[in-house]
Amino acid sequence: MTKRREFIRTSIMGTAGAAIGGMGFSAKSYASIVGANERVNVAVIGIHGMGKNHIRAYTRMKDARLAALCDVDSNLFDECIKTHFTEKGLDKPKLYTDLRKLYEDKEIDAISIVTPNHWHALAAIWAIQAGKHVSVEKPCCHNVYEGRKLVEAAEKSDVIVQDGAEQRSNPCAQSMAAFLHSGKLGEIYLAKGLCYKWRDTIGKTPDEPVPAGVDYDLWLGPAAKRPFSKNRFHYNWHWNWDYGNGDMGNQGVHEIDVARWGLGVTLPVRITATGGHFMFDDDQETPNILLATFEFPNGQGSGDKKKILQFEVRHWITNPEGIKQEAPHDNAYMVSAEHTIGNLFFGSKGYMTKNVNEWQAFMGQDREPGERGDGDGDHYEDFIDAIRFNDQKLANGDIREGFYSCALIHLGNIAYRLERALTFDPETMAFVNDPEADALLTREYRAPYVLPETL
């Protein structure tokens, strides 16, 4: 990564120097304006689960300083500071419980949001309004409406806003998209996103008093008030509709983003979904088996002039379905020898298999191995580079693209919950003559955690 970052620095500073030379500025003075030679002060909100990945990433960078941590569960701070700071000889960060207080800290340049899903959009919008650069974990929104508002806030701002679709930074995914869009696989008519993970039952946990050290009202945020339960808190919030979006909105959003990217589509016109919660009698509300299908118009295509994207969650005994399984590596939460996570693409000249860091095309009726690509990137470093060089494109995570992919998970979940096919209008971003489905495009927001209507 050192060579890559030096190439970015040299290339951009060379371009900057040429562009501003006639304006009386030197490359050195320009660098001081954009902060290219300064460390970026970052704060991470949410230090449990994926938050640890963000902490590890920022503490190893020479161009960033992890200056603050924020979490509603203060019980997490001591171990986090010991593991990631004091044992590594790093300065202790500032500690916050309330993200609103964090946003008042003028020292903080950038915010990395790793909260539960129901906080993502609101936390990001507030950070943007506070003038902070933002990287927001996937999915960038808990519903379609707040995703639209997040895009609106980002596009009106002067700050860098990065969506958490990490594979957008991988050379593997970038070369995959270039290959598919080149036409070498022919007309791409079908893409599949696969998320086969062995997830055991979460059991049942009773309502109980809020643990000491937890600001539970702040954790609930915009969600409805309800008693505390362990199965609605750390991690298992994923399987509750009030806070999470099931596995399609957890691991699955990565594969939906890659599938949509490869197909070259944005929003669908027809959605179907079927599935359920099988095998276990527990507190989980979201399905552990789900098959969602999205239909997109394709005016340049043959036949019915449409493209299809399928996404499937499986949770128990299953086959790999053509996706190469491999031992854990740096992105082990996405690919492992036990899980099958990835994509399949089908074209008129062949098909492609893809996991997080490798793709392979198979050509013709004989399915002969064709072109391939691989390589991991670093989404966190791309965020810091985008800030230092004031270039949104370097973030490799456009928030509008992130919203389109997140919209698919929400539309699929709505079709699943209503148990019927839905027709959607991408122009109005509403369902066609279906107020019941439209009502699920947003939620009731609990004061004072209310999404700003006008930005």
Image: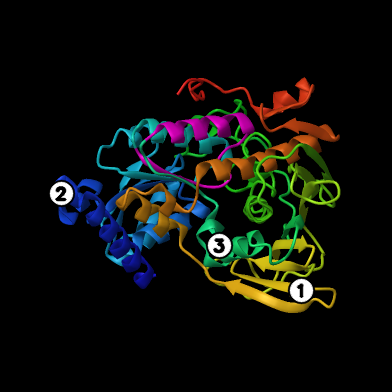
Q: Is residue 85 above or below residue 319?
A: above
Residue 134 seen from this side: yes
Type of the residue with mark 1: Met
- The residue that appears at 75% across and 35% down in the rendered structure is 414
The reply to whether dot 1 and dot 3 touch (C-beta < 8 Å) is no
What is the quadrant of residue 325 in the picture? bottom right
The reply to whether dot 1 and dot 2 touch (C-beta < 8 Å) is no
Q: Residues within 10 Å of mark 1 (few under 14, many from 20)?
A: some
Q: Which residue is mark 2?
A: 25
Distance CA(mark 1)–CA(mark 3): 20 Å
Q: Which residue is mark 3?
A: 174
Q: Which residues are magenta?
A: 132-157
- The residue that appears at 68% across and 62% down in the rendered structure is 183
Q: Secondary structure at mark 1?
A: strand
Q: Secondary structure at mark 3?
A: helix
Q: Which residue is mark 1?
A: 363
Q: Secondary structure at mark 2?
A: loop
Question: Could you tell me residue 161's position as x and y percent?
Answer: 43, 43
Distance CA(mark 1)–CA(mark 2): 53 Å
Question: Could you tell me residue 43's position as x and y percent?
Answer: 36, 46
Judged left or right of residue 307, residue 212 is: left
Nearer mark to the viewer, of 2 and 3 = 2
Question: Could you tell me residue 206's position as x and y percent?
Answer: 68, 38
Q: Is residue 321 above or below residue 252?
A: below
In the image, is residue 156 part of the stretch drawn in magenta?
Answer: yes
Looking at the rendered structure, which numbered label has been put on residue 255? none
